[in-house]
Amino acid sequence: MRRNQALTTYKKGGIHPAEYKLTDKSPVQILPLPEKVTILLSQHIGVPAIPVVSKGDTVKVGQLIAQGKGFVSANIHSSVSGKVVKIDSLPDLTGYKKSAIVIEVEGDDWEENIIQSTDLLKDITLSKDEILEKIRESGIVGLGGAAFPSHVKLILPRDKKAEALIINGVECEPYLTSDHRLMLEYGEEMMVGIRILMKVLNVRKAMIGIENNKADAIYHLTDIASKFPGIEVYPLKVKYPQGSEKQLIEALTGREVPSRKLPVDVGVIVHNISTAYAVYEAVQKNKPLINRIVTVSGKSLKKPSNFVVRIGTSVRFLIEAAGGLPENTGKVISGGLMMGKALNSLDVPVIKGMSGILVIPEDETKRKPIEPCIRCSKCVTVCPMGLEPYLLMSLTQNGNFYRLEKEMVLDCLECGSCSYICPANRPLLDYIRLGKTDVKKII
Amino acid sequence: MGKKESSFVNMVITLFVITLTASIALGFVYEFTKVPIAVAKQAAKMKAINEVLPEFNNLPNEEIYKIVIDNDTLYFYPAREDNKLVGTAIETYTNKGFSGKIKLMVGILPDGSINNIVVLEHKETPGLGDKMSKSKSDFSLQFHKKNPENFNLSVKKDGGDVDAITASTISSRAYCDAVKRAYNAYIKGGKK
Amino acid sequence: MNYIIIIISAIFVNNIVLAKFLGICPFIGVSNRVETSIGMTGAVTFVMVIATIVTYLLQHYILIPFGISFMQTITFILVIAALVQMVEIMLKKVSPVLYQALGIFLPLITTNCAVLGVAILAVQNDYNLIESVVFSIANAIGFGMALLIFSGIREQLELVDVPEPMKGIPIAFIVAGLLAMAFMGFTGIV
Amino acid sequence: MNQWKNFSKGLFRENAVFVLFLGLCPTLGVTTSVINGVGMGLATTFVLLMSNIVVTLIKNFIPDKVRIPSFIVIIASFVTIVELLMQVYLPSLFDELGLFIPLIVVNCLVLGRAEAFASKNTFTSSVVDGLGMGLGFTMALFFLGGVREILGNGSFLGFKFIHGDGILLFILAPGAFIALGYLIMIMNKINKKTA
Amino acid sequence: MSKLLTVSPSPHIYGKDTTPNLMYGVIIALIPVVLASILYFGWGAVIVISVAVISSVLFEFLIQRFLLQKKTTIQDGSAIITGLLLSLCLPSNFPVWLIIPGSLFAIGVGKLSFGGLGNNPFNPALVGRVFLFISFPAQMTSWPEAQGFQTQYIDATTGATPLNIIKEGLGKGDSISHLMDKIPTYQQLFFGNMGGSIGEVAAVALILGLAYLLLRKIITWHIPVSIILTVVIFTGILWLVNPAQNADPLFHILSGGILLGAIFMATDYVTSPMTGKGMIIYGICIGILTVVIRRFGSYPEGVQFAILIMNGFVPLINYYIKPKRFGEEVKNG
Amino acid sequence: MSSILIIILSLCSIGIVAAIILYLFAQKFKVPEDPIIHDVEDALPAANCGGCGYPSCKIFAEACVNSDSLDDLYCPVGGQETMDIVANLLGKEVKQTDPRVAVIRCSGSFENRPRTNHYDGASSCAVASALYVGDTDCPVGCLSMDDCVEVCEFEAIYMNRKTGLPVVIDEKCTACGACVEACPRDIIELRKQNKKDRHIFVSCINKEKGGIARKYCSVACIGCTKCFKVCEFEAITMGNNLAFIDSDMCALCRRCVTECPTNAILEINFPPRRTKTDEEKKTASDKISEKVKTDIKE
Ligand SMILES: Cc1cc2nc3c(=O)[nH]c(=O)nc-3n(C[C@H](O)[C@H](O)[C@H](O)COP(=O)(O)O)c2cc1C
Ligand SMILES: Cc1cc2nc3c(=O)[nH]c(=O)nc-3n(C[C@H](O)[C@H](O)[C@H](O)COP(=O)(O)O)c2cc1C
Ligand SMILES: Cc1cc2nc3c(=O)[nH]c(=O)nc-3n(C[C@H](O)[C@H](O)[C@H](O)COP(=O)(O)O)c2cc1C
Ligand SMILES: Cc1cc2nc3c(=O)[nH]c(=O)nc-3n(C[C@H](O)[C@H](O)[C@H](O)CO)c2cc1C
Ligand code: SF4
Ligand code: SF4
Ligand code: SF4
Ligand code: SF4
Ligand code: FES
């Protein structure tokens, strides 16, 4: 029904990196259980969770092992069954050490109340508050990247009202296909998840934004959406960073979220497609967030695939499953090419927010030598937030934090479009990020 | 060292004494230089007059008279030898210079021909327009002993007889304009 | 029309800094920030106008009638210095805000040849009182414009990698030179 | 020895133009030729020296509040004297330097020295300082005038050594700035090396 | 681990544009102009262009290598552009021994004094050109006639440029309609047949270059379009008010260096504003200044001064004119 | 002669009128300002360098006058002398701060600390440190990207490219603390300046348990407490698996240096040891201090 509609997108800036969606035709496979998982206690934005098990305890799949304390925090559940062998500081994705629980896998013993069948449970029986509690208990965090505890987003401030729910199916990063596969394979479950979210938020309308390069998903979801009142699919023009909350909202509604305001301020709430699916599983099947789909991809990999992975599995294990680390590997990236984190070691665990592992050959990783800015203004043109990256970078280098704040450095999404486009290979985002941290320190 | 404190009386007295001393000193220097300065100023003009006119033995600047023509006021300095007019120096100007006003002293002989021309004042570009000064180029020599009756006071580009200074047509044109102005004034009533 | 010519001439064609070389010290010294140069321009305008008025009166009602024009320099500077100090003292008390914005530049302006220069030029050009005022305002604007452009460029240069020996004053002079070169394009407009 | 240091600092280490950036207007304004530059420099030196002498002699009798006005009167008197004398003896140079002669009064260098040095030091030091500073200033004007005359006019001290014109720009306003910019850079380098 | 992983902040992929890419793009866009100029001026053009380009590149190399003692950047192509554009606004009989100080000034003073590519506030080619114009006005104002391929260089037949004819004529009190007979027709102006500097003879070649630059997205439309439109509107008004004293807009656009300036010089990244809004303001001011200088000033041509003057204002424009920030105007429904 | 009279009259009257008006103005619009601020400002070096943490010398002078004690106020350029003068002027006590000098508390040179990955981002310690642990596994070790070198206005630090560690030139260091601020890893410490620029300090700030620390870096402090036990002057404190030598207490006896099993304690600018046993056991610090000397000479 919306197939012939003109494609919309946001107005300002944006780039178009190569897509490399190698795995968009690979069905999701279930990854075998590893021998050991390392579950970090800080997988979300906010206060780290506090362990509620101790060394030597045996745990089941789905058992609460660490509790989120404080308003912005999330529970953490065991993703495997077995014995807790260590509660210690271990390197996280940045290599710095953070608290983690290490569990040795023994069998696959699930908590009893989790419904393991794959039947679609369409009826939403729980009340609004019960749902919210369920989501909180299940430790669901945003799976679109930021890993912000989802229940917090669902509790609207008293004076604000949401008019619509926006579901982010954009997946604008190169290589990544986990959301894409999810939409194709678990479309109906996801729709139920969206209905649940709509119920909690008390909205009549949900808009699913999908970029035009996922035509199959658009067709598929448009078909099933007709069975779910209020949910509509909107095809979008391909442009990075359309997946970013603010840009997506503008693309779909024409509203711009003002600087340092939240989406609720323009009457919408954004959730990712995988988050909606996780909500479905939590509410309908009692299943906490213990696994997720991770795209393991890269041109040099033997078997690029989409895996369902237990949280805490080591990245090395995933790469082995995808054919092993090629000889010429330069970088291993968690997340997408544009926003992902390069890993300094393969012995780090999968976390809730990890949507992909990319293996990039050596010759493609080298940054080119930095040249002086030629003031071509390309970075200004592509910045989706209307900032001036070249200026932000040199202000950071000169330590002019007062002016940096005035130039709205805190609005930067860290989308990387500016560094991508710069013909002089300037590490714009590297410095802007630093500038943001420094500015946050002084205000 | 003990400085004086800044009381009202002290301040006024100090300033008074200083200004008094200063003004006395200045007054004397002024008195002393008053006449020489006037002489020096006259000397410059006299030098120009001398240069543009043939030998004379009167004091042209004491016989100065002015002629008003088309709203222009020009000063004339008649030169006589033994009471016989041998030439007239005319202080003339133009505003058409590349950088504004140019002042010339033009010496005209009784027969109407130009004896000599000296630039009194100009702001033309050094190296270009300033070549109209005698010390910088021979431009002004071409007017020597020419009678504008049969010497068209325009640059060649405009159909005249004057060779313009290279790359300074504007200055040359302005120069001619000033000379023309002097000549016209001379013809139209300056001849005394 | 006369006023327009005075204004255009003072701002563009015979810009006080770029063509006449007056007020170079503060031009070089106080031009690293755009904001300061705005303050400086305000202060200069203020002082220049007042100084031109007072010196005009002085010239036409004291120096000329008494035939002592040679005392121009000494009387003008004395009056200007006293005036600036008076203004400074007064501002501090009457409007601390204004003092904060302009006052810190005032002592600098006393020893700024632009003010005395404009006062003398106004007399030399035989302007009447109103023309003198227009002349001084236009010159102040010309000064301000040059200062503003200059501070903009210098602020930008601070963010780039100027060769070590050229840093600071030398490069400022080069910029001033190129700017003066560009402004030569206005030659002949009036 | 000490006085020599006192003297030479004005020439190099604390050169008014190249290091302290004072008195820039006359520096740029009159240096179309060496002669003009040196003439201006010497006129300034004279005023500087004389005012330093007078200030250091009477410094103890001047109350603080009227210090600046008194200094200005003293300086202005000497400037006027220079003006008058030049009109008698060097009328053509006086015309060339024009406005910049009365502006010696506001040359930050002169007042700055009176205020910062002469009002605090002994007679000999003040004389030496005035001389050093003034000659340093003259030297700067000499260099700048030299560069501009050579490049802009192809002559030195009025003696023409090339046929035709020089690079006009250096005689005009922009050339003054640019030449001074590079001179300061070179001076910086020299000062740094000897430091 | 045998081989070490590489770690760097995101993003991990980069676009294809590089500085040399963009610069060589501009050089390609200049090819039609160069060809046209050789066609009309012959050997003179060849000599002037090659001397300017070679000396610019050489000076860039020598100064960076021996005075600044850093890596040379001649391979990025910007010095070639500077040399090319400098030569394109010289007359084709301009003596070689003056071209060399011109490129030295352009590269040495205009560019490398500030630290080289990207730092200079003023357009180096124009700095060189205005330097020559001011320093050697005689040589800079003798314009060979465009008469098809010629073999003579210094002693080429010279004539006045259309703008000069107009300026001088008006100065003498002639009226435009009278003067128009003396200058080339529009068709000649468009395809290139007039006295003038090497690069401004053929409007069509310049417009080809503009098309290429826009297609390859090397520049945006803002600057050229706003300059040209402003000149058209401003001269149009003057022309309508007093056709006897003012030439018509089309003449102004096609004659002299407006197209060359608007397309290749005002657009120089380094010396033009960073935002669309800023570029338009910049363009409009250049247009106005150009006409003011042409019409009221001493010089017949004003683009180069106009661009240089506005180069001076660029930092202020960048300081005050900001891009529209996301979410600046709240559009709620 | 009458013209002289006119001259005298006019100039004097202008002078006197100016004096009177100025006086009246000064009286009428008097703004109380503490003259002492001016005096303090005069005493300061007028470098306006910001080393004191205030934007200009004048503001620092105001701060000195307005605060109750001068404890937190220190002008690094003028040094203790200047602060004494200021204290005298204000009649306030100054805390006696000994002259200090910066030291680098990391010995994780390329040799001592294996690299575990390759960094390819913007060359800035701050950027790298915010991104991740760095190109070794030590989460607190030097990142070798010159942030401290760039920030030093006195050119008192340079990077030794062979070791990948910065080196402080003691004579040039003014202890302004800029590098301490700049180092994202807090490696740099201002320590008491001893005679002949001698230092003894634990050149490591890693708080991991011994075994782990040692794995990252062969000269890490492993918290074995041997030095702590041997120090007679109670200059050494232990905490979090890390020893710390208080420069105010240390008597430079050098006992701890030889005691340390990992050579984590450095002695700099000491004459070489003469005993035979020490010859073979030439400490890492000896090597480094020799290196420093030759580097400076170069
Ligand atoms: C510090 C912080 C506080 C937030 N607070 C709220 C909140 O109070 N309510 C809400 O709905 N979302 C909140 N958010 C969530 C954001 O709106 C956004 O959904 C989340 O950061 C993920 O967005 P992204 O992946 O586009 O960056 C917060 C996010 C952050 C980082
Ligand atoms: C530059 C940028 C790109 C993003 N791209 C995507 C994306 O492709 N898909 C997605 O679901 N979220 C993306 N996000 C995150 C969203 O902004 C937002 O956090 C998310 O949709 C909120 O849903 P969640 O809380 O359920 O994760 C992106 C964020 C940024 C800043
Ligand atoms: C810096 C500069 C100064 C100039 N000064 C003068 C000048 O003083 N007098 C003049 O007639 N033209 C001057 N010109 C104008 C040019 O030489 C102009 O092109 C010339 O007058 C016209 O050329 P033509 O004389 O060969 O016809 C100057 C040009 C420039 C760039
Ligand atoms: C679109 C474009 C236009 C350019 N125009 C000029 C120019 O007019 N003059 C010039 O010297 N360099 C020009 N360059 C080259 C380069 O940007 C210039 O040399 C820099 O100013 C040197 O820092 C241009 C480059 C580009 C990409
Ligand atoms: S990373 Fe920040 S500054 Fe750069 S384009 Fe994205 S939002 Fe703009
Ligand atoms: S894209 Fe790069 S070269 Fe262009 S303006 Fe931005 S930082 Fe400068
Ligand atoms: S920054 Fe300061 S403390 Fe650090 S080495 Fe330099 S002078 Fe010493
Ligand atoms: S000491 Fe600190 S600032 Fe200096 S290089 Fe090492 S990590 Fe960087
Ligand atoms: S000499 Fe200093 S402002 Fe002119």
Image (cartoon, coloured by chain):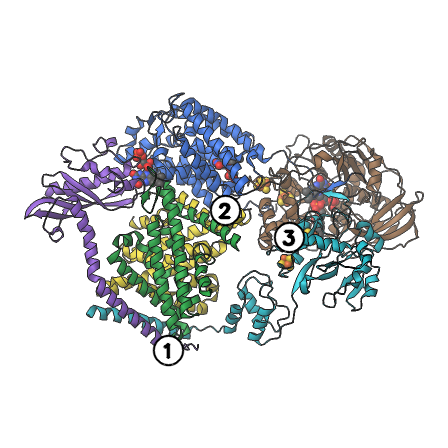
Q: CA distance from mark 1 to mark 2?
A: 52 Å
Q: CA distance from mark 3 to mark 1?
A: 62 Å
Residue A357 relative to residue A366: left or right? right
Mark 3: amino acid: Lys
Q: Quick check: do tags 1 and 2 share a chain?
A: no
Give the mark count. 3
Mark 1: amino acid: Asn
Q: Is residue A99 above or below residue A271?
A: below
- Circle 2 is placed at which residue position? E315
Q: Is residue F178 above or below residue B15?
A: above
- For chain A, what colour was chosen? brown
Chain in cyan in the render: F
- For chain B, what colour was chosen? purple
- Circle 1 is placed at which residue position? B10
Q: Which of the 4 image quarters holds residue D7?
A: bottom left
- For chain D, what colour was chosen? green
- Circle 3 is placed at which residue position? F297
> In this rendering, does residue B73 appear at all?
no
Q: Secondary structure at mark 1?
A: helix
Q: Nearer the viewer, mark 2 or mark 3?
A: 3
Chain in yellow in the render: C
